[in-house]
């Protein structure tokens, strides 16, 4: 027979105030419910007497399953400081396959000079704290890392993260304003990188060259921004074995699309859904292509998947045109930027 005795209220408040002194009412309610479920004394009745097991002696497997229901913000708010058993559970590799920071945004303003954004110091400090705790608990086991489209990480953030995520396979980092110059060094450390979601950048040739040199299993790329012939040429030169490419909601020239279809011979999946397709390229005045012609369709027929949408009635196509191929995601539904018709690239 097993009897469960709730964790004493006074002990809960003492522990909570020590670990989360600045927590709000909602956090207090959440963690009180959490402790009432987890933090108990186990009284096991046996022949010859009573054996007492305290709540901190709870089975590690059970703790890990419970911790899997917590967000990264809850996991990094002091759980690991309760006791050694809880810290051991909080470091379990199953909790840290993915570090999802796609809900965390920077408090920033746009500025005319590079890096074109000014990030409030409090935002940087918050991210620093979360990264330090997460990367300490993860013990190098993170394989997928997701950042918000409006989370502008610093060079120090990226360097610190790259050094502590040696097994990284997938990176979603749409905002590079403050890290473009150190991204090459980060790529040097990610030998297992397979998938990257990134913005349009000036130093794209150097980046893909670094990927080709260091990441032998790289196969998926998503570009969030205009994609021109220079980008395409770099891919053909350095990543000719690329399997999956998504350019959804971006500005794309027809000639560039044809170049991709002709020269990326290993390409298996191409997503140009909701793209602003333009012809001809500069310096000639361009016009919007509202229908894919026979030439493009024939060249794309060799692909396993060719995902398209250029309908005038499509809301996303209209938005891409209104934003001139450089999406202002802040204007639209929360989390819309995470979507992709290629399932492996969606969040």
Image (spheres, helix red, strand yellow):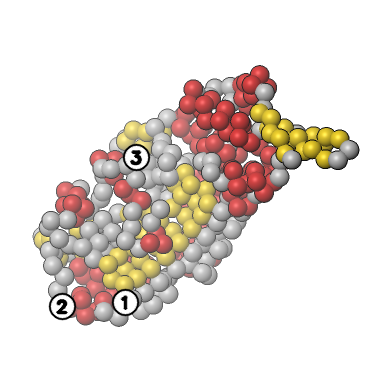
In the picture of the structure, the residue carrying the numbered disc 1 is: 303
Q: Is residue 337 left or right of residue 162?
A: left
Q: Nearer the viewer, residue 128 or 306?
A: 306
Instruction: Estimate the x, y position of residue 25 in percent, counting from the top left.
Output: 49, 22
Q: Is residue 299 left or right of residue 58?
A: left
Badge 3 marks a residue whose secondary structure is loop
- The x, y position of residue 160, in whole percent, is 57, 45
- Between marks 3 and 1, how big is the CA–CA gap? 38 Å
Frontmost of labels 3 and 2 is 2
Q: Tell me, yes or no, if residue 22 can be seen here.
A: yes
Q: Nearer the viewer, mark 3 or mark 1?
A: 1
Q: Tell me the residue at 13%/64% (across/down).
A: 289
Query: Which quarter of the figure has residue 167?
Result: bottom right
Which residue, as the protein is rendered here, is positioned at the far right? 48
- Taking the spot 35% from the left edge, 66% from the top edge, the residue there is 245
Q: From the viewer's side, name the closer residue of 106 and 3.
A: 3
Give the mark, 2 or 1, whose residue is nearer the N terminus.
2
62 or 27, nearer to the observer: 62
Residue at point 51%, 69% (across, down): 217
Task: Give how far apart the Cα atoms at labels 3 and 2 are.
Answer: 41 Å
Quarter-wise, where is residue 117 in the image?
A: top left
Packing grade of label 1 (10 A; few <14, some 14-19, many >=20) is some
**Mark 2 and mark 1 residues within 8 Å of each other at the beta carbon:** no
Residue displayed at 12% across by 63% down: 290
Res. 294 mark: 2
* Mark 3 crowd level (few <14, some 14–19, many ≥20, 10 Å Cα): few
């Amino acid at each position: 027979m097993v009897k469960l005795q709730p964790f004493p209220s006074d002990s809960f408040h003492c522990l909570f105030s020590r670990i989360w002194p600045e927590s709000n009412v909602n956090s207090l309610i959440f963690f009180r419910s959490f402790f009432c479920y987890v933090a108990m004394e186990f009284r096991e009745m046996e022949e010859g007497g009573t054996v007492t097991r305290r709540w901190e002696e709870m089975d590690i497997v059970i703790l890990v399953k419970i911790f899997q229901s917590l967000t990264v913000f809850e996991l990094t708010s002091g759980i690991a400081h309760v006791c050694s058993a809880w810290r051991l559970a909080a470091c379990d590799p199953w909790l840290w396959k993915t570090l999802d920071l796609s809900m965390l945004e920077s408090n920033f303003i746009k500025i005319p000079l590079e890096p074109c954004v000014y990030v409030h110091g409090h935002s940087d400090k918050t991210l620093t704290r979360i990264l330090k705790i997460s990367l300490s608990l993860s013990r190098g086991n993170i394989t997928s890392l997701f950042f918000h489209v409006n989370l502008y990480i610093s060079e120090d953030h990226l360097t610190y993260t790259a050094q502590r995520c040696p097994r990284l396979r997938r990176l979603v980092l749409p905002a590079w304003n403050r890290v473009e110059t150190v991204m090459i060094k980060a790529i040097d450390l990610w030998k297992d990188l397979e998938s990257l979601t990134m913005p349009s950048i000036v130093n794209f040739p150097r980046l893909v060259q670094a990927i080709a040199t260091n990441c032998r299993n790289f196969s998926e790329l998503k570009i969030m921004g205009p994609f021109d012939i220079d980008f395409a040429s770099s891919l053909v030169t350095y990543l000719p074995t690329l399997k999956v490419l998504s350019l959804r909601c971006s500005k794309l020239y027809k000639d560039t699309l044809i170049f991709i279809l002709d020269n990326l011979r290993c390409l298996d999946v191409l997503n140009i859904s909701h793209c602003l397709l333009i012809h001809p390229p500069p310096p000639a005045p361009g016009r919007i292509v509202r229908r894919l012609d026979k030439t493009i369709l024939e060249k794309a027929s060799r692909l396993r998947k060719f995902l398209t949408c250029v309908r005038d009635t499509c809301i996303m196509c209209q938005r891409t045109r209104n934003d001139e191929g450089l999406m202002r995601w802040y204007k639209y539904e929360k989390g819309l930027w995470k979507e992709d018709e290629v399932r492996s690239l969606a969040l």
